[in-house]
Amino acid sequence: MREQYWDWYVNFKYKIEYLIAYKIRKDRLSDIYSAVLLLASAAGIASLSFWDSVPILWGAITLAAQVMQTIKPKIPSFRQGPALNYILQDLERYFLDVKSTWYNIDNMDDTEIQAFICEIDSKVESCEERFSGDLNFPIVKSCAKKAGKRYEEYFRYYFGIDVKGDS
């Protein structure tokens, strides 16, 4: 049962690292989107001073900015932000319990270990349902790669071992 707990512990850490990498990626994409909107809006305002010279170009820029602003709430990554914040907050708190339990696992029997795993899994599932609703967080290879490196570093630092795999 201790081996099963260890595997679960490694997978749990990987999941957290993946969601962190995903959130960083999502935040960067959101920032780029917002910057494009800002530039388009600024160009639209600037175009007022010389509207007569190229009216079609400025009209297209203004239209594009308005369309981007209108569809922004429908883009999944903008809706994922708050959910990811709350989910990660809870998962990191649960992870402290998982880590603490690992250090005391020799004082637990198999039934207690299994009950603890079920309790945390239930909390995680409840948290994800409560905050993400109909949102999903697809697997992005670059995020998976970053998560793999981060969780490998964690286990190398804290336990002096190499963990490999896709988790």
Image (cartoon, rainbow, N blue to C red):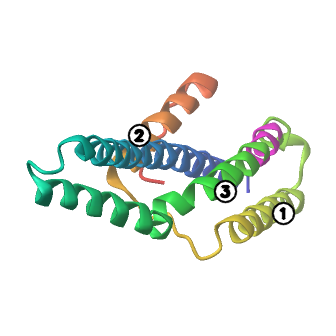
Q: Earlier in the sequence, mark 2 or mark 1?
A: 1
Kind of element beneath mark 2: helix
Mark 2 closeness class: few <14, some 14–19, many ≥20 residues within 10 Å: some
Query: Within the image, what quadrant is residue 92 found in?
Result: top right
Which numbered dot is residue 4? 3
Mark 3 closeness class: few <14, some 14–19, many ≥20 residues within 10 Å: few
In the picture of the structure, the residue carrying the numbered disc 2 is 146
Residue type at mark 3?
Answer: Gln
Q: CA distance from mark 3 to mark 2?
A: 24 Å
Q: CA distance from mark 2 to mark 1?
A: 28 Å
Which numbered dot is residue 119? 1
Q: Position of residue 130 (x, y in %)?
A: 75, 69
Decide: is 115 above or below 49: below
Query: Within the image, what quadrant is residue 62 found in?
Result: bottom left
Kind of element beneath mark 1: helix
Q: Earlier in the sequence, mark 3 or mark 1?
A: 3
Bounds of the magenta segment:
94-100
Residue type at mark 1?
Answer: Glu
Give the residue displayed 51% in from the left and 58% down from the top: 78
Does 62 sit left or right of 123 as displayed? left
Q: Position of residue 165 (x, y in %)?
A: 42, 49
Tell which of 92 and 13 is nearer to you. 92
Decide: is 63 above or below 8: below
Give the residue displayed 48% in from the left and 41% down from the top: 24
Q: Quadrant of the N terminus?
A: bottom right
Q: Is residue 164 visible?
A: no
Residue 135 magenta: no
Tell which of 78 and 120 is nearer to you. 78
